[in-house]
Amino acid sequence: MKKILYLSLVAVSLSLTSCINVIEELFLNKDGSGKYHITIDMSSIMADGGMRSMMQQFGGDELNNPDNPFASEEPIEVDSVMYMKDAPDSLRQAFGNDDLLKRIKIHQIMSESKEVMTTQFILDFKEIAEVDEFLQKLDKLQTDDNPFGGGGGGLLPSSNGQNALFQLAKRSLTRNAVAGGDAMDAIGDQEKGMMRMMLADATYKVVYHLPGKVKKTTMEGALVDGKTVTLEFPAVDAMEGKAKMDGNIKFKNR
């Protein structure tokens, strides 16, 4: 699984004209529990006929690795789930919350036949505060050989721990602004240029699924449809902290 995630990121860097879309989803239940998903959709890379040849050209020794799906001429068909509870002991210890760890998984799909390439981070949370902890832990785990850390290479939202990203009070959900939210601050100028080129046509979508019909929202540019609130931004703006995602959603009991 680790190799597959690594190869996904390599494929992205080798295909700068391809579009990467990020979808952040919050599914909220009446009792305050729910699911939190981050999906990084790189399907346009899988649809690119030259992607396999690029991987074979630049793969080097990885082409001799049986875990490398690009080493064979067979169609690439991977559908894999990694449960964080099964991660190495060192990573679990660094994470520091076994209960939360048990409710996190990473779902990877790479399919040539369906032209799909997605990586999805999934958390089943008991209370909204666990979303913040989940994001903070991912940032804490960042290392050169760790596919879980670093906010997904800047493609996942960050939570700096100074204020909660989400707050829930009765039938009101609030997303707070996060200070210092520029994910590109940690990389060099050359890497910034590559990221801006790579994400030029990319979108960052946020979708809130509420347990009751939405009464009103203060989120700028939000599209309300029954129990769902959707916002969409250029991915570069989201990474540079320019996308205005904060605001409040008030919803009914059902």
Image (cartoon, rainbow, N blue to C red):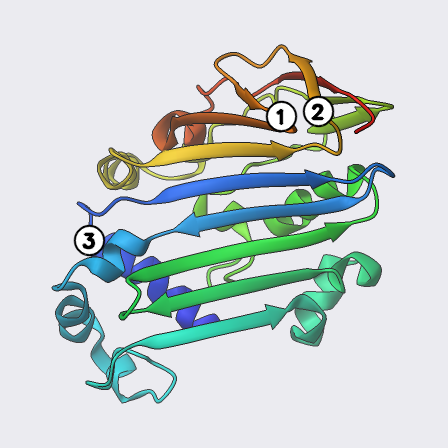
Q: Which residue is mark 1?
A: 226
Q: Amino acid at mark 2?
A: Lys
First in sequence, mark 3 or 1: give its number: 3
Tag 3 secondary structure: loop
Q: Tell me the CA gap for discs 1 and 2.
A: 5 Å
- Contact? badges 3 and 1 (CB < 8 Å): no
Q: Which residue is mark 2?
A: 213
User: Which amino acid is tagged 3?
Assistant: Ser
Residue that appears at 50% across and 61% down: 147
Please identify the quadrant where the C terminus is shown.
top right
Is the C-beta separation of discs 3 and 2 under 8 Å?
Answer: no
Query: Which residue is tagged 3?
Result: 15
Label 1: few (<14), some or many (≥20) within 10 Å? Answer: few
Q: Which is more N-terminal, label 2 or label 3? A: 3
Is there CB contact under 8 Å for labels 1 and 2? yes
Q: Is residue 57 left or right of residue 101?
A: left
Element carrying mark 1: loop
Query: Disc 3 and disc 1: Cα gap in Å?
Result: 38 Å
177, 150: nearer the viewer: 177
Residue 113 falls in which quadrant of the image? bottom left
Foreground mark, 3 or 1, reads 1
Q: Position of residue 125 (x, y in %)?
A: 77, 48
**Residue 183 horizontal side relative to residue 126, left or right:** left
Q: Secondary structure at mark 2?
A: loop
Q: Earlier in the sequence, mark 1 or mark 2?
A: 2
Name the quadrant containing residue 104: bottom right
Q: Nearer the viewer, residue 131 or 239?
A: 131
> Is residue 233 visible in the rendered structure shown here?
yes
Residue 224 in the image: state x and y as whole percent.
56, 21
Q: Residue at image x 65%, y 73%?
A: 87
Q: Position of residue 138 (x, y in %)?
A: 62, 51
Q: Within the image, what quadrant is residue 56 found in?
A: bottom left
